[in-house]
Each structure stands twice: as structure tokens, then as C-alpha cells.
């Protein structure tokens, strides 16, 4: 196969591993800098150019689109899809996963366990929203935050109200969520590839920290997950339409609740914690599935 990977930093662990794995299995994998791709949007002959050359002959594309370049990255990926190149994850599915509210609505529609989550646009409804989420302690999250930045724990209704008002004053979108205390500062990340959980790790926050993000000093270990957790992860991937994703769950008293579904999961933490070669399994998935014009949506919707 000839594979194209859209990524801005070829030196990242995940990107290096995917390239290595593809080459070890006899494929060619070229990395293109997403922001340096340019396109011609002409009727019936979509094209993408990179460094003065037309990108042609690709069997598959691996989108590794950073959150900050979602808008342009999705346009480039749609163009690949319109050219009939098989995407590891489709642009439409990535678009869903990048919007936290839309993701939660899709997961709720499919009956998946979620933390009670509320949001409102109008500041006059702050108290109602806090009440609806079950009252303090509450977690307040920036919709555009990543790696735990902009995730705040408010212990009392009063502090929750001040945090909501402060975020609103800064004109950022937020959601207010039930605090899952029994998760004990840890969460589960399940790696789903082609409808199966192939690895799972438990992340635990640093001492005194309720956020378990590895970027915030958390640590990760391999974990055996329950059948219910496994099923929750695969159903979440399906609801989003993602072939490959990381499903973040909290262990709540009423079973697993999904916090987030990540369409470009990092491989370093989970490969190191579990010793599982995830990169090769992703390439293997492409070997089985990549066929021209097999995209479900071809960038529609
Ligand atoms: P980000 O997408 O920025 O990583 P998350 O929503 O994943 O933000 O939250 C960061 C961390 O905070 C999670 O990994 C989890 O450990 C903790 N956390 C988030 N939401 C809750 C919640 N509702 N209850 C308990 N802990 C939470």
C-alpha cells in the first residue's frame, strides 16, 4: 500500500511508530504537513498538492490532525475522501469527536453511560444549570480545552457559580458536569481499532490531583477492563463512526461513564504501559479495509 499520513510533526512518537510499522509490513508511508497541503476545488477532479507535486496513487490516508488545525485539516481530509482515498477515520467522524457537546449528544442518543452534563448559553441560567447537574461538587470544563487545561473542580455551589461566571466573562463555551468522586482521580483509556478494544490503560493523577492527564503528571498502567467497559468503549466508537479512537471512561458507582472519545489517540502512553504494538494493528486494519471509494460519507454531512 501507499499510505499518506497528515501530521505536522513527523518526530512525534505516534507518527514515528506508525511509519515504522507500515514500512515493516512492506508499505510506503509518506508524511505530509497538513498546513502545507493546498487544494484545487474544481468540479469532478479534486486534487491535493504538496511541495509543488500532486499527491496521487494513495490507497489510504492517516489523519493526525491536531486540535488547533481542525478546520483546515478536515478540509484536506475531505479532499482525500473525494479523491477516493480510504481514510483511517472519516472527516465527518473526526468532526463529531472534536465537538464535545455534539459527541455527548450522540453518545446519549445511543444510551451510553455519561456523567450528568449540563450547559446553557445564557448567564442568567447559571444557578439552574448547577442545580440540574446535581449541585456541587461539580466539574466545569472549557469546551475547547485539551490535556486537562480548563477543567476545574468546584467544591461548593458558590464556587461553581463564580467559576461559571468567570469563564462566561471570558466568552468561552463551557459545560458543567457531575463530579465522579468514586473514580478517585483515575480514568480508563481504551484503544479501539476496527470495533475491538485492543489495549486499555488506567491513568492516575498526581497526588492531590483529580485530573489524570499524563501531561499533568499522571501515570499510566495496563489494566484489565470489564466486559461492560469493553462494550461501552466499542459502542462509543461506533456511535461516533470512528475506526480508531481512544475512549476515556470513568469508573462510576453506576458503571462506566464516557468522558471523551479521541480520534487521534497518542500511542506512547498506551504502548509503553501495555507493551502492545498498537501501530502495527492500525496498519493491519488498513490492509484489511482500505479500498478505493470505500468512505461511507465522502466528506458529506
Ligand atoms: P481534557 O479533554 O482536557 O483531557 P477531560 O474532560 O478529559 O479534559 O478531563 C481531564 C481529567 O479530569 C480526566 O482525565 C479525569 O481524570 C478528570 N475528570 C474529568 N471530568 C471528570 C468528572 N466529571 N468527574 C471526575 N473526574 C473528571
Image (cartoon, rainbow, N blue to C red):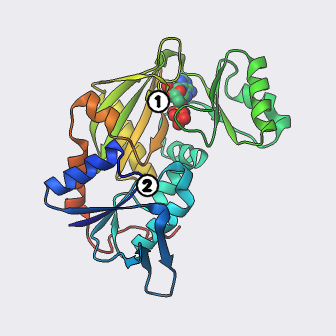
Tag 2's secondary structure?
loop
Q: Residue at left 14%, top 53%? A: 24
Q: Which circle marks residue 8 in the picture?
A: 2
From the viewer's perspective, is 235 left or right of 207? left
In front: label 2 or label 1: 2
Q: Earlier in the sequence, mark 2 or mark 1?
A: 2
Q: Residue at left 27%, top 31%? A: 272
- The answer to which of 186 and 111 lies nearer the viewer is 186
Dot 2: within a 10 Å radius of its alpha carbon, few (fewer than 14), some, or many (20 or more) residues? some
Residue 236 horizontal/vertical position (percent): 42, 43
Q: Is residue 284 visible?
A: no
Residue 16 horizontal/vertical position (percent): 29, 48
Residue denoted by label 1? 215
- Rendering quarter of residue 127: top right
Q: Are the two marked residues, 2 and 1, in contact with CB atoms closer than 8 angstroms?
A: no
Q: Residue at left 51%, top 67%? A: 75
Amino acid at each position: 500500500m501507499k499510505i499518506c499520513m497528515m501530521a505536522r510533526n513527523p518526530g512525534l512518537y505516534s507518527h514515528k511508530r506508525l511509519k515504522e510499522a507500515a514500512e515493516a509490513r512492506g508499505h510506503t508511508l509518506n508524511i505530509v504537513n497538513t498546513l502545507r497541503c493546498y487544494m484545487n476545488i474544481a468540479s469532478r477532479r479534486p486534487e491535493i498538492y504538496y511541495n509543488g507535486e500532486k499527491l496521487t496513487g494513495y490507497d489510504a490516508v492517516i489523519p493526525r490532525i491536531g486540535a488547533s488545525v481542525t478546520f483546515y485539516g478536515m478540509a484536506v481530509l475531505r479532499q482525500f475522501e473525494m479523491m477516493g482515498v480510504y481514510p483511517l477515520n472519516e472527516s465527518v467522524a473526526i468532526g463529531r469527536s472534536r465537538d464535545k457537546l455534539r459527541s455527548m449528544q450522540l453518545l446519549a442518543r445511543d444510551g451510553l453511560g455519561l456523567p450528568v452534563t449540563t450547559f446553557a448559553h445564557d448567564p442568567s441560567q447559571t444557578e439552574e444549570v448547577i442545580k440540574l447537574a446535581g449541585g456541587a461538587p461539580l466539574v466545569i470544563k472549557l469546551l475547547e480545552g485539551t490535556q486537562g487545561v480548563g477543567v476545574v473542580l468546584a467544591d461548593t455551589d458558590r464556587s461553581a457559580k463564580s467559576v461559571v461566571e468567570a469563564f462566561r466573562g471570558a466568552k468561552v463555551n463551557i459545560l458543567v458536569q457531575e463530579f465522579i468522586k468514586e473514580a478517585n482521580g483515575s480514568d480508563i483509556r481504551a484503544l479501539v481499532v476496527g470495533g475491538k478494544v485492543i489495549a486499555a490503560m488506567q491513568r492516575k493523577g498526581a497526588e492531590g490531583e483529580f485530573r489524570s492527564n499524563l501531561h499533568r503528571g499522571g501515570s499510566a498502567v495496563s489494566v484489565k477492563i470489564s466486559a461492560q467497559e469493553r462494550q461501552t468503549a466499542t459502542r462509543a466508537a461506533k456511535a461516533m463512526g470512528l475506526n480508531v479512537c481512544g475512549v476515556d471512561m470513568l469508573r462510576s458507582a453506576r458503571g462506566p461513564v464516557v468522558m471523551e472519545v479521541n480520534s487521534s489517540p497518542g500511542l506512547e502512553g498506551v504502548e509503553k504501559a501495555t507493551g502492545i504494538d498498537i501501530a502495527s494493528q492500525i496498519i493491519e486494519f488498513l490492509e484489511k479495509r482500505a479500498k478505493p471509494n470505500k468512505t461511507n460519507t465522502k466528506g458529506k454531512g
